Structure formats: C-alpha cells, structure tokens
Amino acid sequence: MAGHLINAADSVLIWYFLALNSFYGLLLALSIPEIWKHWKLSSTDEVSRYLSSDALPPISVLMPAYNMESSIVSSVRAQLALQYPQHEVLLINDGSTDGTLERLREAYDLYEVPPAMPKSIPTQHVRRYFRARKAAGLMVVDKENGGKADALNAGLNAARYPLALAVDADTMVEPDALLRLARVFLSGRPVVAAGGTIRIANGCRVQDAQVVEARLPRQSLPLVQVPEYLRAFLFGRLGWNRLGGNLIVSGAFGLFHRQHLLEIGGYATDNVVEDLDLVVRLHRHLREQGTPYEISFIPDPVAWTEVPSDLRTLGRQRERWHRGLILTMLRHRSMLLNPRYGTVGMVMMPFFFFGEMLAPVVELVGYLLTGFGLYFGLIDQQMALLFLAAALGYGMMLTVWAVILEEVTFRAYTRDSDFARMLLFAFLEPFGYRQLTVAWRLRSFWSVLRGRTQWGEMRRTGFQDAQDKAA
C-alpha cells in the first residue's frame, strides 16, 4: 500500500516538473523570434541615429544610494555621461552615515535649492535638495533613511521628466543603454515600462564605473550564476513578451512612465522585492482602468551588476527574493485565475504562484519521497531516474540552450574558452548549486510566517578599476 502511494505521489511530482519545464521550453521557443528581431535592431549605427532625434522623451535617472562614499562620484559621473539627448540624474542619499554626501559636494560643488516640487508620494523626511554647479543635469536629494523603495519614491517626487529610470547606484549601465531602452517608447505601441538585460560584472575589467571588457568571473560561485542569469533574461523574459508582457522589470535597470507610477502610489515600502510588487500593481491598475498597455523586455540594453561571491550573501539574496515573491503573490491573490486581468490573471499569476513560488516545496517533497522510496525498496530505480530527469535534467538542457542563444547572438563574452566554461557550469548547476537555492528559498516561507521584513546584509567586494590595475 505504501509503495503504491509513493509511486503515485512520485508520478504527480514528475508530471509537475514536466509541465513546469515544458512551459519554460515554450518560453524558450517564443523567445527565438523575439531575440532575432531585437538582434537585427541592435547594431551600433542603428542606435546612434536616435542621438539626433527630437522624438525621444527626456528621462529622469533615479539612483538611491546608502553609504557609498568610495564609489559614488564615479557612479554619478557614469550616469551623467550616458548617451542620451536629454536626461537628468537624481541621486537620492538615503540617510548615509559615511561621507557619501560630502564626496558629492566636493566633486560637483553642490548648492542647496528650495523644495519647489510637490510631494505626490509620502516618504521619509527630505532634509535638503541640491543642484550642482559642475553638472547641470544633477540633483541630489538628501533624506532620512527609509530603504530603497522610499528613496525611489522621493526621486519620483523630485523628477522633472515623463520617463523614470530606476537604477542601483552600484549598477554600471552601458553608455548607449538608455538609447536602446527608450527606443521602444517610439514604436507606436502603448509601452508603459521596459526592462533591459542584467549581466554579471564579477571578473570584468572596469574603468570609471564602466565595463570596458566583459570577462567571466574567475570564482566558481559567481560563474555558476552566469548561465542562470542568461536563462532568466535571455529567453525567460523575452518569451513573456509574446505572452502579453512581463511580470518583472528589474529594479536595478527599469524604465517607466512616471505618471503611472505616481497613480499607483509609487514603490511599496513594505515589500523586500519592490520591483516585482510594483509591476504587479501596475498591471492591476491598468487592467482595472481598461488602459491598453505593454510591459516589455528589451535584450540589448545592458547593465552590469556585482553578484554575491560567498554563500552567506547569496543565500540572503535568494531568500529575500523568494520572500518578496511569496508576499507579492499572497497580497495580490485575488488576481490569480481571475479572467478580469486577462493573460496576467490566467497565465502569469498562476505560473508564478504554482510554478515559481511553490517549486522549492514540491522539489523538497520529491527528494524526500524518492530517497525514502529507494531506501525501503518501495519504488524502482527507473521511477527515481524519471524524477531526476524531469526535475533536473530537463531544466539543465534549457539552460544549455540559453547559453547557446547567447553565443550565436549577442556574444558578450568573446574569449574562445568562455563558451565552453559557460556550458560546463550549465551542466554543473543542477548538482549541488540547485539544491542550495532550494534550501534558501524554503527558508523564505519561515521568514514570511515570522513576519521578517529585513533585507539582510548584502556584502559586496567591489571592483578594482582598470586604471588602478595598470598602475
């Protein structure tokens, strides 16, 4: 009797992973015409023509910063130097306790200006506003600490322009990325938000807060995350373009119509994954208003970010990401399988609820049942191998295809050995690393039950400037 129950349960789990990974396979298939379309439009000559266009809407770049004394000047300089006809940079100093503000005052000769903008979204107290004598496009908002979401809301209040780019202060945006990202707003389609590709900067040569040479990380832990990011961005989000738009626009690099963000009250300060929560609320608001819209992913605008290089920091990050997913799904559960919200309610929300949120729970149950069944002879080896093939092997092959797509299209990593190294780590990812991510995501359920709201310390090692290396 017990054997029949375990075999039946294992069969259900196998079908679960076959369905989940087949949906990922569908996203991969749908991404191929999308990536081909964007690849043909991504030539430098094509993008450069936009520089002289009067049609491009001006952009406010919102950069929250907390205790970034050592790198803040070069980060602001890189954002000011982005190739774009008209953009401003709003640096929001979120109650830094180090010399972040003093470094900015020295570098850009800041002077205080009166608060002449309306406070559309409630935030922590803004102490002062500054303009820069040495950079006409820079404003610094000095406020009391309230977290990243609160800082972004202060930036939305102070912004002058119709489009707002949310970017982390330690994210390195490629010089032409704004042009590439903004061009979708000239397509004639009702685009309200667009996200670009996030790539891993660990191991890259960096100069003046810009990646000057793309290199794969030397350490194994950041390197195994490269295929993972390619899978998430290159075919995951591209495939969603064909299914009605994306549910996630990365908080490290996302462009939005500012007015729509003001309408929904900006970023939620009570969710540790503010970008996912924001986009779900944006979908909900626009669907309820009956407003035609698109939320797109564009693969060729690129921003580079440092990923965790130690297990403790990576575990905190993945636990926080999944905790934010759980909170967002529970908060907006009324959208789940609700035809009022169209594709969002009938496809996106069910996928993220049953496929993403519950996947670590199902996977843990699968490991336990399969191990128990094998140990006591209640299931045969063929059933165990079928479970592993459905849960691990199928997903591994999809990751391999993501690496191949990267190699035949954008090919950011140009060394001869890079493709082989990415393939190797795509094959290694399901064995050990995958199980660690399952454990970290499972921990997030306990955090939600305890009402934990902390981000947890995100330790970063930083980058050595290419000029320093040459010295």
Image: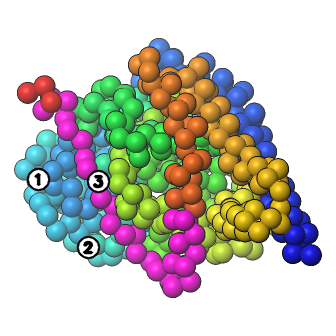
Q: Position of residue 193 (x, y in %)?
A: 57, 48
Amino acid at the residue labelled 2: Glu
Q: Is residue 332 above or below residue 211?
A: below
Q: Which residue is identified by label 3?
A: 460
Q: Which mark is residue 147?
A: none
Amino acid at the residue labelled 1: Arg
Asked whether residue 282 is in view, the answer is yes
Q: Nearer the viewer, residue 79 or 370?
A: 370
Amino acid at the residue labelled 3: Arg
The CA distance from mark 2 to mark 3 is: 23 Å
Q: Is residue 84 above or below residue 75?
A: above
Q: Which residue is identified by label 2?
A: 144
Residue at 15% in and 30% down: 469
Q: Is residue 444 magenta?
A: yes
Residue at 20% in and 49% down: 72
Q: Residues within 10 Å of mark 3 (few under 14, many from 20)?
A: few
Describe the element under mark 1 as helix, strand or loop. helix
Q: Residues within 10 Å of mark 2 (few under 14, many from 20)?
A: some
Q: Nearer the viewer, residue 227 or 31?
A: 227
Q: Position of residue 46 (x, y in %)?
A: 51, 17
- The span picked out in magenta is 439-468
Q: Is disc 3 in contact with disc 1, using a CB cutoff of under 8 Å?
A: no
Describe the element under mark 3 as helix, strand or loop. loop
Q: Which residue is identified by label 1?
A: 103
Which quadrant of the structure image shows residue 396? Answer: top right
Precedes in sequence: disc 2 or disc 3: 2
